[in-house]
Amino acid sequence: MTSTELLPHLERYFASEKLESAVFFGAGVLAVVVAVRLFFSELDSRALMYPLCAVGLIQLAVGASVGLRTDGQVAALKAQLGSAPHELQQAETARMTKVLRGFELYKRVEILLFTAGLFLALFLRRSDAWYWVGTGLVAQSAFMLVADLFAERRAEAYLAQLALLSS
């Protein structure tokens, strides 16, 4: 594969990353807004605010950081692809391998939080607080897991295309 042939794969990967970062950011805003509303409420579901706020802040941070750095990252990679494709291949392969290792950790944490949420919602359901904390953990960790599964799949496809780049 030539540099010219890799370019659309690079652009597609980062465009999808930027789109998902906007989804993450939006989900974070929604979660934090709902958490604040719950904080000031007298609803039985008030404890739902804890997992919504905790994970919502993570979603805001990840969404903002990925969204803000992507355009600059793409511009730098395009320039490097034109001038030093072999160096880009080496650097991006190393970076993407690290990204994929990160997804392994994220999935484990998300599955652990999902399982903990299920336990709380199913076995401590007599307590409103634990039930709603568990329900919030299930919802937020499931959303994050699905989003990370999509991102991991994109990262694997991009890494496979990088491997095809001829020097």
Image (cartoon, helix red, strand yellow):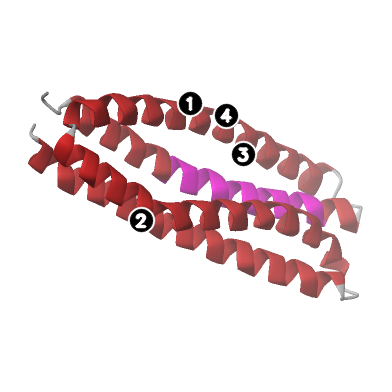
Cα–Cα gap, marks 2 and 1: 24 Å
Asked whether residue 36 is drawn in magenta, I would say: no
41 relative position to 134: left or right: right
Asked whether residue 140 is drawn in magenta, I would say: yes
Camera-near label (3 vs 1) is: 1
**Can residue 17 be seen here?**
no
Q: Eyeballing the image, is 150 above or below 31? A: above
Looking at the picture, tell me which residue is in the foreground, 75 or 152. Answer: 75
Inspect the image, locate mark 2, and give the three-letter code of the amino acid beneath it: Asp
Residue under label 1, please give it. Answer: 101
Inspect the image, locate mark 4, and give the three-letter code of the amino acid beneath it: Leu
Residue under label 3, please give it. Answer: 110
Q: Considering only order in the chain, which callout, 4 or 2, is on the residue closer to the N terminus?
A: 2
Which quadrant of the rendered structure holds the C terminus? Answer: top left
133 relative position to 158: left or right: right
67 relative position to 11: left or right: right
The range drawn in magenta is 132-150
Cα–Cα gap, marks 2 and 3: 28 Å
Q: Considering only order in the chain, which callout, 4 or 3, is on the residue closer to the N terminus?
A: 4
Inspect the image, locate mark 3, and give the three-letter code of the amino acid beneath it: Glu
